[in-house]
């Protein structure tokens, strides 16, 4: 499957600077492993084996609202974001930079560019779980909704195993429903020299707090190479399933309280608009 071509592939606004967040929205570092040799770490220039790439947050996926969990207490709200950035973006960046972990779903975008002289065929993208624990139960934070691009959309259900193939929704003829099929069982992604593409990566987990990375398997000039994409500073990406209950609940107050700030809620999710974050 041929990706969309771009005249200036690395001038996307998200690629002009490193987004100051951690966890699942981090700029990727890469490790390359060849089937004929041992693994070795690459430099943080996100270019190795002739393939440049980054993993960035897909803000469109978070625009319908999002929930995150903290393993400890809610960080101080003294530096809650203000300004012209979309509130769901700036608040998410504030939370993620303080250790928040997505609950149930993470929305990412993978940008790839072929820097070599030969065509590259991406024949697999997998999510690899490297640590699996019960969901986080300490602190819950929820932000409300903020109110399509023609991209390949790959989905990864981390509850299904530790090496998860890329799935994609497929419409059923004469039916309003869709089903999930393995994307790379019938298709691949090809990149000619200098060509670029971006792919939506939607990650889901209901029963675990999972740390994971992505594996990108590619063919160039009849050799097979696997590129591993981790989070910032080489750390794993992270996601947590929802807990049955949390020790603390907090909500963005723009809808419930009609004012900015983060406010405490009880276990029934009733927001106390007088109890804002310290």
Image (cartoon, rainbow, N blue to C red):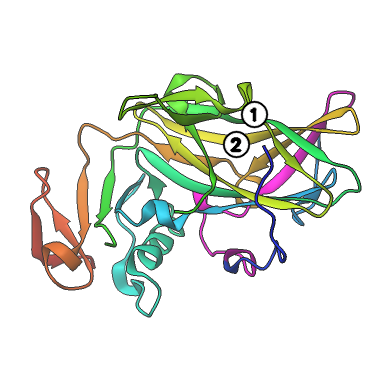
- Which of the two labelled residues, at mark 2 and mark 1, occupies the earlier sequence position? 1
Asked if the residue under mark 1 is in contact with the one under mark 2, i.e. CB atoms within 8 Å, the reply is no
Tell whether position 20 is magenta: yes
Q: Secondary structure at mark 2?
A: strand
Tell me the number on the disc at residue 33: none
- Between 147 and 275, the one nearer to me in the picture: 147
Tell whether position 148 is magenta: no
Q: Quadrant of the N terminus?
A: top right
Residue 43 picture location, percent across and down = 79, 52
Mark pair 2, 1: CA separation? 22 Å
Q: Report crowding for label 2: few under 14, some 14 to 19, many 20 or more residues within 10 A (C-alpha).
A: many
Residue 90 picture location, percent across and down = 39, 67
Residue 233 picture location, percent across and down = 65, 51
- Between 32 and 244, the one nearer to me in the picture: 32
Could you say which quadrant of the image residue 56 lies in? bottom right
- Between 192 and 159, the one nearer to me in the picture: 192
* Image: magenta residue range: 14-38
Q: Secondary structure at mark 1?
A: loop
Residue 200 picture location, percent across and down = 53, 45
- Residue indicated by mark 2: 213
In the image: residue 79, left or right of residue 107: left
As drawn, 183 above or below 94 = above
- Residue indicated by mark 1: 187
Q: Report crowding for label 1: few under 14, some 14 to 19, many 20 or more residues within 10 A (C-alpha).
A: few
């Amino acid at each position: 499957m041929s990706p969309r071509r771009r005249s200036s592939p690395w001038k996307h606004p998200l690629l002009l600077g490193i987004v100051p967040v951690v966890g699942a929205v981090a700029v990727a570092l890469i490790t390359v492993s060849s089937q004929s040799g041992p693994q070795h770490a690459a430099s943080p220039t996100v270019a190795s084996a002739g393939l440049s790439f980054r993993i960035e947050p897909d803000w469109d996926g978070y625009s319908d609202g999002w929930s995150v969990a903290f393993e400890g207490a809610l960080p101080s709200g003294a530096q809650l974001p203000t300004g012209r950035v979309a509130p769901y973006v700036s608040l998410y960046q504030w939370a993620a930079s303080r250790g928040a972990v997505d609950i149930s779903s993470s929305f990412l975008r993978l940008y790839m560019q072929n820097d070599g002289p030969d065509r590259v065929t991406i024949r697999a993208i997998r999510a690899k779980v490297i640590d699996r624990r019960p969901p986080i139960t300490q602190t819950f934070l929820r932000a409300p909704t903020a109110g399509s691009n023609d991209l390949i959309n790959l989905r990864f259900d981390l509850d299904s195993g530790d090496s998860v193939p890329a799935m994609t929704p497929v419409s059923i003829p004469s039916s309003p429903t869709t089903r999930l099929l393995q994307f790379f069982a019938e298709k691949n992604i090809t990149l000619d020299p200098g060509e670029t593409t971006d792919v939506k990566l939607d990650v889901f987990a209901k029963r675990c707090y999972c740390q994971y990375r992505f594996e990108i398997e590619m063919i160039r000039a009849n050799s097979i190479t696997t590129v591993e994409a981790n989070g910032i500073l080489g750390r794993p990406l992270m996601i947590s399933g929802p807990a049955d209950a949390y020790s603390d609940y907090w909500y963005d107050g723009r809808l419930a309280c009609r004012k900015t700030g983060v406010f405490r809620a009880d276990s029934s999710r009733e927001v106390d608009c007088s109890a804002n974050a310290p």
